[in-house]
Image: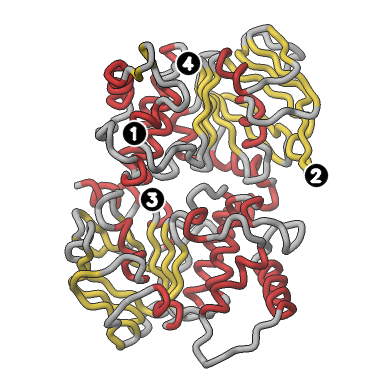
């Protein structure tokens, strides 16, 4: 790689950043070419997010240089990034839930005419951007009332309105269904021709190969390689991300395990209806099997697991758990009946983000006791948390670390681990690999298969169709709140067709 940027819009040299004892970036050298889609991939903790934050002004590097269009900047602030035309869409939404859509599209930069906000003018600017990304939404609707997928597209529109020359996208499709994702990818493909350079950060390698001109792989805060996409294949990228040894293990484990199933029915759902999207869903889950749930966002699939757990009330239908009808499903009763839910939004409802790893590992087990009063000691809780950290190989400095400081994969291990501590009979996994890197996904899939092998029943919803075809023994397709069919041994393309037809 040359020592100076001749064709790159951005060139960084020896960029370093340390957080306490963690070296987040370690002398990173990287060029980002102009008017192209440049993908950056790596495991959680590889340094991608720190690099993105430095480019957008959210974090100041400890050392190194950043050259933009031939000008070297000692550091980039948020205001300077905006002046330079650098926009970033974070995976974690930075939106105001209690304000309307239009206000969220112009945060702290409303157009004013004298003392008044020019809302009509803002509408005229916003509508073509929303149309370009395929989002039909009332500009005066309260943002918190919208689906997470719509909110993610609004976050993208907020950045696009600024017309950035460098657009950084951090996991932009993590909450989108297949159709929405493809529309967004098509938009990204068109941006270089319009003069926008795109930095695309994603754990979804299918998307990366579909959209990127160049792929850069990071590991342990440094660049492993940066090459044109046409010179790479999936296995080479995976080897770069996780290392050769781990890559070989993932490859060995990449085939679906043909586990013999056919145990007793743990869960039977008949003609289920709730007060939202679910109109008529029926399914079964047997002991020792993984059952998939496939459907577009808004189809009812995304409400099903929370409804079965009692987090959303039912209006009619029958839920039977090991032959016992659940007359009044509730979250408290589900825990006592040994039903576990790993929710889709781990940050809002799966974890206490400001509490310690120890606290998060402990609170479900404490609430799950069913045999009268149990003496609970601090030493006992600490011992339990330490055991779970070791069992699930959670990467944390100590038990007192805020769980919000862990990587996405390690956060998800905490969510799964705390529920497995109550030894559930039925495990509801709602899009559990969202925002999780490929190495952590492999570990999570192994845990899911171990659950089934131990005789538990698993109901698994995912927005990534490949996960369903890879992991599940059977899959139910849901459309318009109704179970349309049950399938097994189908390929990804066929399942996508069934979901969308």
For marks 4 and 2 on the same chain, the one whose residue lies earlier in the sequence:
2
Q: Is residue 102 above or below residue 391?
A: above
Q: CA distance from mark 2 to mark 1?
A: 38 Å
Residue 241 in percent (x, y) is at 64, 42
Residue at figure coordinates x 44%, y 72% from the top left: 427
For marks 3 and 1 on the same chain, the one whose residue lies earlier in the sequence:
1
Tell me if 384 is positioned left or right of 157 in this view. Answer: right
Tell me if 32 is positioned left or right of 138 in this view. Answer: right
Residue 13 in percent (x, y) is at 76, 21
Task: Please give the label number shown on residue 130.
Answer: none
Marks 4/2 in contact by CB < 8 Å: the verdict is no
From the viewer's perspective, is the residue at label 4 or at label 2 nearer?
2
Residue neighbourhood size for the residue with mark 3, other residues' Cα within 10 Å, grouped as few (<14), some (14–19), many (≥20): many
Residue on which disc 1 sits? 101
Task: Please give the label number shown on residue 463.
Answer: 3
Q: CA distance from mark 4 to mark 2?
A: 36 Å
Numbered disc 2: secondary structure:
loop
For marks 2 and 1 on the same chain, the one whose residue lies earlier in the sequence:
2
Residue 66 in percent (x, y) is at 71, 18
Q: Is residue 83 above or below residue 301?
A: above
Numbered disc 1: secondary structure:
helix
Residue at figure coordinates x 47%, y 59% from the top left: 349
Q: Is residue 56 visible?
A: yes
Marks 3/2 in contact by CB < 8 Å: the verdict is no
């Amino acid at each position: 790689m040359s020592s100076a940027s001749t064709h790159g819009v951005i060139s960084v040299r020896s960029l370093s950043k340390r957080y306490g004892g963690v070296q987040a970036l370690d002398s990173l050298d990287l060029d980002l070419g102009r008017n192209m889609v440049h993908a950056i991939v790596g495991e959680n903790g590889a340094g991608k997010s720190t690099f993105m934050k430095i480019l957008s002004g959210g974090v100041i590097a400890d050392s190194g240089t950043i050259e933009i269009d031939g000008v070297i900047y000692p550091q980039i602030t948020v205001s300077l990034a905006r002046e330079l035309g650098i926009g970033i869409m974070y995976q974690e939404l930075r939106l105001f839930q209690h304000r309307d859509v239009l206000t969220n599209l112009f945060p702290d930069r409303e157009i004013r005419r004298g003392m008044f906000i020019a809302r009509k003018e803002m509408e005229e600017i916003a509508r073509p951007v929303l149309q370009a990304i395929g989002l039909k939404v009332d500009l005066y609707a309260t943002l918190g009332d919208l689906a997470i997928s719509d909110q993610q597209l609004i976050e993208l529109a907020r950045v696009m309105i600024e017309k950035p020359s460098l657009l950084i996208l951090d996991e932009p499709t993590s909450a989108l269904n297949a159709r929405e994702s493809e529309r967004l990818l098509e938009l990204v493909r068109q941006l270089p021709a319009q003069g926008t350079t795109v930095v695309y950060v994603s754990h979804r390698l299918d998307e990366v190969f579909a959209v990127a001109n160049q792929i850069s792989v990071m590991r342990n805060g440094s660049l492993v390689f940066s090459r044109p996409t046409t010179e790479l294949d999936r296995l080479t990228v995976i080897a770069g991300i996780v290392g050769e040894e781990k890559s070989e293990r993932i490859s060995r484990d990449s085939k679906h395990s043909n586990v013999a199933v056919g145990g007793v029915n743990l869960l039977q759902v008949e003609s289920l209806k709730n007060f939202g999207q679910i109109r008529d869903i029926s399914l079964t889950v047997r002991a020792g099997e993984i059952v998939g749930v496939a459907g577009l966002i808004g189809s009812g699939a995304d409400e099903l697991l929370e409804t079965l757990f009692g987090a959303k009330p039912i209006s009619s239908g029958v839920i039977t758990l090991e032959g016992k009808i659940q007359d009044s499903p509730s979250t408290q009763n589900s825990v006592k009946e040994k039903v576990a839910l790993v929710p889709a939004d781990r940050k809002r409802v799966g974890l206490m983000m400001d509490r310690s790893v120890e606290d998060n590992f402990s609170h479900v087990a404490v609430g799950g006791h069913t045999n009268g009063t149990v003496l609970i000691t601090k030493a006992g809780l600490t011992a339990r948390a330490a055991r779970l950290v070791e069992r699930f190989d959670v990467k944390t400095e100590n038990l007192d670390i805020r769980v919000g400081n862990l990587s996405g994969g390690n956060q998800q291990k905490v969510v799964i681990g705390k529920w497995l501590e109550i030894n559930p009979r039925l495990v509801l996994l709602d899009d559990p690999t969202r925002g999780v890197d490929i190495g952590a996904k492999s570990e999570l899939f192994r845990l899911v298969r171990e659950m089934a092998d131990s005789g538990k029943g698993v109901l698994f919803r995912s927005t990534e169709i490949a996960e369903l075809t890879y992991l599940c023994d059977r899959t139910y397709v849901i459309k318009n709140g109704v179970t349309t069919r049950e399938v097994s041994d189908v390929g990804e393309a066929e399942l996508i067709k069934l979901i969308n037809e």
